[in-house]
Amino acid sequence: MPWSTRHLINNLSTMKNVKISTIYNCYLLLFFLLIFAMCQGKKDNRNSILSNTSKNNELIEINIDDLDDNTPILFSSVFKNFKLTPLETRNECLIGRISKMEVIDDTLYILDSNIAKSLFLFDREGKFIQKIGKIGKGPGEYIQPAFFSVNYKEKQILILDTKQQKIIRYASNGDFINEFKLEKDLLPIQIATQKDLIYIDQLNSKYMPSDYLLYALDKSGKIKTSWLSSMIYQLGFKHPVNNSFNFFTTTTDIKYVKPFFDTIFSISENQIKPYLHVHTTNKVTKQDMVEINGFNDTKQYLNFSKKYNKFLGITDYMESNRLVMFKFRNHAETHNLFYYHSSNEIFCTTKFIDDLTLAVHPSIFYCTYKNNFISCIQSATPNAIESFIANVAEKRIKMTEKEKFALNGIKATSNPIIVFYECRENFLRHD
């Protein structure tokens, strides 16, 4: 019992010659104090999840306010080398821009959702294998393949078609299995699948009636459960702005994060729990969100976020068995954070410089595979391929003769060059 309640009871027991109305008022006050004490033991869904996990020492907690982020970090401090896989360039597999990539059992799954609007499969050497599905309105066909996910257990491929509001299931060899329409209240932008469940990342928008951000569906598309209220975890954020990759799938779980989240969640066996939590005193408040939601369109929000001095959440989460890496926006700058599992070391910078491939693009990673972080050099980024080839020719980039030979015939209009950056076991400090 709280001290204030106990103190009140003692006072009541010693009262003499008090009017009945006064006694009644005191007991009424006592009643409300007891209710308050009971409520104090309860917390909102977000806080209770975090506190319980923290007690079990299962939660990685990082205080970003104490980090030094002014020192540039070189790729060679994080990665010990890199390998290239130039993708075969043929008319039937031309890629405009990579939207999403997965590497599973030495097969590269590459989605171009905007230009080619197709999911392509290549082998580890970059040779084209096949295309999954085709554009159309019939069974097994898609119009806008916005996202895909591979079910490790069942060796199946799921494609989300946001235009036709359906999810299509294929076998690993590309054969069409089945499809289902999504319920009318669902407006997913990304999906992930594991075992018998499909997870839906819901578009957060003032036009959507649902408050939840994450849904679990069964094989037929029926909603089994939902998690994470937008009002709690995003303070009611109502603009249709999302990270490039809100899901990160491993062989054991799925990591999930959303704009304005300070926590990365782990999903497994139809359960969700916090995995990594970022502490900062610079968080967005409910009053800030009122101002943000007042913008008329997404462009206004994006322009505003570039100058906004608050913590805007975690993005671009990636992990291997050695390293966790993600970005976050804080004080109007993009920060790159690195966390090493074995040593619990944390490094952070606003300047992450590729001194290995001298790539002109910002550090974008699509997935990880066998302790490699995977990026690409593609023609969709102006001068990216031309600059890379010139640097190789002028010996600014360290490569073997065999690796240089594999680049013969590569030109500005070629398919992307996939880059496998192999992680170091520990961070390498450059003096």
Image: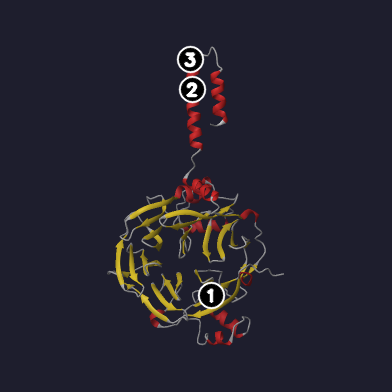
Q: Residues within 10 Å of mark 1 (few under 14, many from 20)?
A: many
**Quarter occupied by residue 176:** bottom left
**Element under label 1?**
strand
- The span from disc 1 to disc 2 (Cα, nearest Å) is 70 Å
**Element under label 2?**
helix
In this view, which residue lies farthest toward the left? 138
In this view, which residue lies farthest toward the right? 431
Q: Is residue 243 left or right of residue 307?
A: left
**Quarter occupied by residue 187:** bottom left
Is any part of residue 33 visible from this angle?
Answer: yes
Which color scheme does this rendered protein use?
secondary structure
Q: Residue at x 50, y 87 (%)?
A: 409
Task: First in sequence, mark 3 or 2: give its number.
Answer: 3
Q: Residue at x 53, y 75 (%)?
A: 420
- The span from disc 1 to disc 3 (Cα, nearest Å) is 81 Å
**Element under label 3?**
helix
In this view, which residue lies farthest toward the top? 17
**Which numbered circle lies on residue 420?**
1
- The span from disc 3 to disc 2 (Cα, nearest Å) is 11 Å
Mark 3 and 2 residues: CB-CB less than 8 Å, in contact? no
Q: Position of residue 26 (x, y in %)?
A: 51, 21
Q: Position of residue 282 (x, y in %)?
A: 59, 50
**Which numbered circle lies on residue 27?**
2
In this view, which residue lies farthest toward the front? 56
Q: Residues within 10 Å of mark 3 (few under 14, many from 20)?
A: few
Q: Position of residue 233 (x, y in %)?
A: 48, 50
Task: First in sequence, mark 1 or 3: give its number.
Answer: 3
Q: Amino acid at mark 1?
A: Phe
**Quarter occupied by residue 339:** bottom right
Nearest the eye: 235 or 324: 324
Q: Position of residue 19 (x, y in %)?
A: 50, 13
**Which numbered circle lies on residue 253?**
none
